[in-house]
Amino acid sequence: MFVALLTASCVTSKKVNYMQKPDKQIPSYADTLLYTDYILQTDDRLFVQVYSIDEKIAALFNGGATFTNVRQMARNNAANSNSDLYTYLVDRDGNINFPTLGHVYVRGLNTRQVKHLLEEKLAGMIIQQGSMPNLAVEVQVVGRTFSMVGMKSGRYTLPKEKVTIFEALAMAGDIPDFGYRHEIKIVREVKDSTVIKTFDVRSEDIINSEFYYVEPNDVIYVRRMPGYSFGINSAATAISVTAGTISFGVFIYSLVMRIKGAVDKAHNNGGTSGTGGS
């Protein structure tokens, strides 16, 4: 029983190594990688900056601040999640409240589509006022994060638009040896619903699959192996535990045999004394 337990709890390279070729234990994934722009959802926060050679127009939509100050303050506020300054929240109705334009519906669009939409609306408004629509708009999603739960817990900021599953795991300090790499689960928000995707991160085919890129608000779940509490993660440890267990077993056996011998001797001595007395 001990040998079976030791074998089951031993962490082998097969269980922990990445980029392994698919076989009977490691699945293959079809080439379904198709990176698409992130689709805006409720509670996303957008950084919007308007560029124009007309300083009055730029100041109107950027709160009178310089371009550099606007960008830095927007990123700081989004990271701290404590201010609406220079960022625009996508509300429950899917709108952002933009100066002079009012409510603009952006949910279900990507940032490029929002950029063109705002440029079109602002240009139309400026033309109505008799000016030339010389402007450009920059739109970015700020405060993009993902979370890790299970053997690793924490919330992390996505440093760029395209972050792979390996980069995400590296940011979290990688999966410990006793984490299930063959059954990673991602809880992902898709439009107005939530889906759970399960995959084996050990397969090299993962780089061509839909699981390769992490999206904002993803929750990555890594569960423990059943033998986590008593697992063996090296040959030296296995030999040490085996030798210790055998030694302890020999000691217990020797102790039991000595007690048994003492009891038998006492019993024999007692029988001999009784015979002599009679």
Image (cartoon, rainbow, N blue to C red):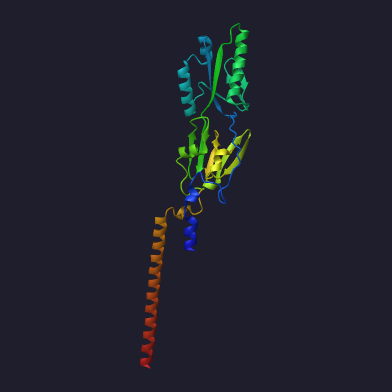
Give the residue at the far top of this rendering: 130
**Which quadrant is the C terminus positioned in?**
bottom left
Pick the residue in front: 168 or 150: 168
Pick the residue in front: 105 or 112: 112
Number of marks drawn: 0
Q: Residue at the spot x=50%, y=50% of the render?
A: 15
| Residue 146 percent location from the top left of the image | 52, 35
| Residue 169 percent location from the top left of the image | 48, 40
Answer yes or no: is residue 211 visible: no
Answer yes or no: is residue 163 visible: yes
Residue 213 in which image quadrant: top right
| Residue 187 percent location from the top left of the image | 57, 39
Residue 97 in which image quadrant: top right
With 132 as the anchor, is 231 left or right in this view?
Answer: left
| Residue 257 percent location from the top left of the image | 39, 75
Q: Is residue 103 above or below residue 257?
A: above
Q: Residue at the spot x=42%, y=56% of the render?
A: 235
